[in-house]
Amino acid sequence: MSFTVLDHYKGFVLNSFIKKDIKQIDLLNKISFAWEQFNKNNLFFSKKKKIGIYVYGFVGTGKTFLLSLFCQYSKTGKKIHFNHFMNYIHEALNSKENINKNKKLETFIKEFCKDIKILFIDELHIFNIVDALLIRKIFLLLEENNIFVMTSSNFKPGDLYKDGLQRSDFIPFIKHIKENYDVIGVDSQTDYRRLALNQSKTYFTPINRDTEEEFNLLFNRLVDINNITSKKIEVKSREINFTKCSANVAYCTFKFICNTNLAHEDYARIAKEFKLIFIEKVPKMTNDYSDQCRRFISLIDMLYDNKCSVVILAENPISSLCQITNLSNEFQRTASRLYEMTITQTS
């Protein structure tokens, strides 16, 4: 009997890396079936088969893990984060070669896919008009090269690029996905990322080699470390550039998020963008840190109000983090929220 992707999945269960989830098994079966149909050559199946799969659902439900698992199992697949994929494409289109952009795109896709049969595009999202106008061409070229496209997204196809500029020009892509792809919603009630946080220490102190290692190991456990990307957040005329992100998880320093001149509305926008933020090197806040402490209070308020999670590496425990007398009363609320948001902490 041949080894299947479900055997691969069961291996993770047996080694206690994950818990068995019937809905995850069902998704793997659907992916396997779509792949089998894609590879059938007779005329009947060629008319009926789907040319890819589009999996959507909330963050933490295991979409990326399961599609990555299938990609690894196939041994003919390649995984790439959508942001990275588009960066490569824009670099190719902006090259100095004296050929038109359509030809540049065709050449890039052909070269990118020359040794694979499956391409897994993780975290597909459309936030700008340039990508909105390009994406259908990209998918059609992948299909012309006989690539089975697997896509994960936090959005239903119909919710992509909602209220975007010239969205009418984007609608044909949505229609193409709905008609030609197996669109699968993941409605698992288990948030695996939240579960991992619940089982972990999420406030690390003091700052030393051991706590830094634990802090980074937790980040690596919760994200796809091979697909770290950057994200630019725009608030009015300001740009806030996070350089270490994966989906809606961000990693930053206290200096970056509290030393710069950010305001309440900036933190509100950050809280809308990310559901989990890792903040390292939070200092003991003495009088020299009054401005930074006020920003930290504002940040935690916004994260708390938006039901975000936070993981912190700090110089002091929560109870003695703020040592600024005229902010002590205000920080009591922040401390209370930090105790609630960070599941466990050292004393």
Image (cartoon, helix red, strand yellow):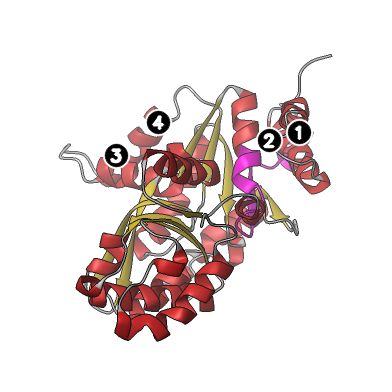
Question: For mark 2, what is the residue?
Answer: 17
What kind of residue is marked 1? Val
Q: Earlier in the sequence, mark 3 or mark 2?
A: 2
Instruction: Residue at 24%, 44% (x, y): give it.
Output: 100
Q: Taking 142 as reference, is 74 above or below it?
A: above
Question: For mark 1, what is the residue?
Answer: 13
Question: For mark 3, what is the residue?
Answer: 104
Tell me the SS state at disc 4.
helix
Q: Earlier in the sequence, mark 1 or mark 4?
A: 1
What kind of residue is marked 2? Phe
Q: Residues within 10 Å of mark 2 (few under 14, many from 20)?
A: few
- Distance from the alpha carbon under mark 2 to that under mark 4: 32 Å
Place residue 273 in its image quadrant: bottom left
Q: Is residue 287 magenta?
A: no
Q: Earlier in the sequence, mark 1 or mark 3?
A: 1
Q: In the drawing, does residue 70 fall left or right of residue 32?
A: left
Q: In the image, residue 36 lies at what x, y percent?
A: 74, 30
Query: Foreground: 196 or 88?
Result: 196
- Distance from the alpha carbon under mark 4 to that under mark 3: 12 Å
Observer-side mark, 1 or 4, equals: 1
Question: For mark 4, what is the residue?
Answer: 112
Q: Residues within 10 Å of mark 3 (few under 14, many from 20)?
A: some
Q: What is the span of residues highlighted in magenta in the rendered image?
A: 44-67
Instruction: Residue at 55%, 68% (x, y): give it.
Output: 339
Q: In the drawing, does residue 119 fall left or right of residue 281?
A: right
Place residue 282 in its image quadrant: bottom left
